Structure formats: C-alpha cells, structure tokens
Image: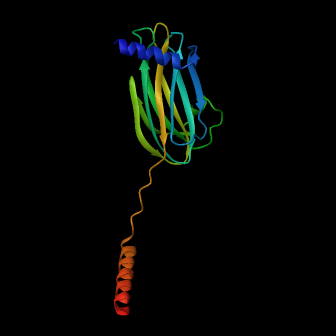
Amino acid sequence: MRHDLAWAALALALFSSTAQAADVVVHTLDFNTPTLPFTISYGQTFTAASADTFHDEYIFQLQSASFSNATLTMSLGSLLTISDLGANLYRYVDPLQPVGGAALADPTKATLIAQGSGSNLSIHALDLSAGRYVLDISGIVTGSAGGSYAGVFNLSPVLQAAPVPEPTGLLLAAAGIAGLAATRRRQR
C-alpha cells in the first residue's frame, strides 16, 4: 500500500499539466509525426472535484507503426479518484479541423480502432497504417480533491518479415546452379 501511495505521489509530481474541473474538460496534446521508436509518459491531474467528465486527446501522425498503450487511475483513497476511465483509439478519415474535443463528436472524421474501460487499461499492440490518429482518454473526476491518471504511450516501427522466395524463383536458381556445375565438370 505504501508503494502505491509513493508511486501516486511521484506520478502527480511528474505531470505538471493540471486542469480545473468543469462540465467537460478537453485537453489536447499533438505529438505531430514522432520519430520511431517513440515512448512518452502522459497524464492529467484535476484539482477540483465535482463529478465532471473529461476527454484528453493525444494526437499523432504516422507513416506506419505498431501502437500500444497502458493507462491507470491514480487514487489516494477517496482524495484523487477517477471513475469510468476509458481509452479509445481513433483514426481520422479527414484532417482534424479544429484541434480539440469537438472533432470526436463528428463520426465522419474519426473511426474507432480499439477501446477499453476500467481502472487499468491497455490497448495491445496494433499495426497502424499511415494516417492521423487520436488516443482519447476519458473519465469522471469523483475524488474529494480531484482526480489523476497516468499512462505510457508507445509507437515502434512495424517489423517487416523477410520476403519468402517464390517457388518458381527457387526452381530457376536450382537449375542455374545445376547447369553451372555441369559446365564445370565438362571443362575439366
């Protein structure tokens, strides 16, 4: 238990982004086109408690990559609590017009790729094609002093499998080697 409290305190100190709770809080961070591999810790601390909802959007552009994510709520008893924590990964079909929460409400601009909910979330490795994506973390701030969450965001290059030679190519290569061997035998 002590270890959990120490970790929570450290995480709160690391994440300087603090928002005052309101009806709906939207926080947007654009990673642009990150150089792969890319790993970053992210999070949010809400200082007021009033059972308000939030959507935090982490936006990124890819040529292609493998994506994975893990998020958890930070809770110090009933002081800093988030309920209904959820994570959704969207692909934008059109360019994001205003960067902000309004775009997620427009289903023509985003297609859901993966989702999860609970206090410990993880979106397991997904190979993503080129395009613009947003990781949306949402929840309700329910702690008496606010709420907090933290996560790790990972992007890595997609591993390309070595090409498998076609059977006809193998047959031609074998015939060429056999012909070369026969020519050498005749020359001796």
Give the residue drawn at x 38%, y 16%.
4
Percent of width and height locating residue 22: 57, 14
Percent of width and height locating residue 110: 54, 39
Percent of width and height locating residue 185: 34, 89
Q: Nearer the viewer, residue 70 or 95?
A: 70
Give the residue drawn at x 51%, y 41%.
37
Chosen colour scheme: rainbow
Percent of width and height locating residue 64: 52, 48
Whether residue 23 can be seen here: yes
- Report the residue that reaches farthest toward the front: 188
Q: Nearer the viewer, residue 19 or 109?
A: 19
Quadrant of residue 98 in the image?
top right
Whether residue 140 can be seen here: no
Q: Nearer the viewer, residue 118 or 164?
A: 164
Q: Is residue 89 above or below residue 79?
A: below
Give the residue drawn at x 57%, y 44%.
93
Q: Nearer the viewer, residue 53 or 134?
A: 134
- Rendered-image quadrant of the N terminus: top left
Q: Is residue 98 above or below residue 182?
A: above
Give the residue drawn at x 41%, y 11%.
76
- In this rendering, the count of numbered labels is 0
- Rendered-image quadrant of the C terminus: bottom left
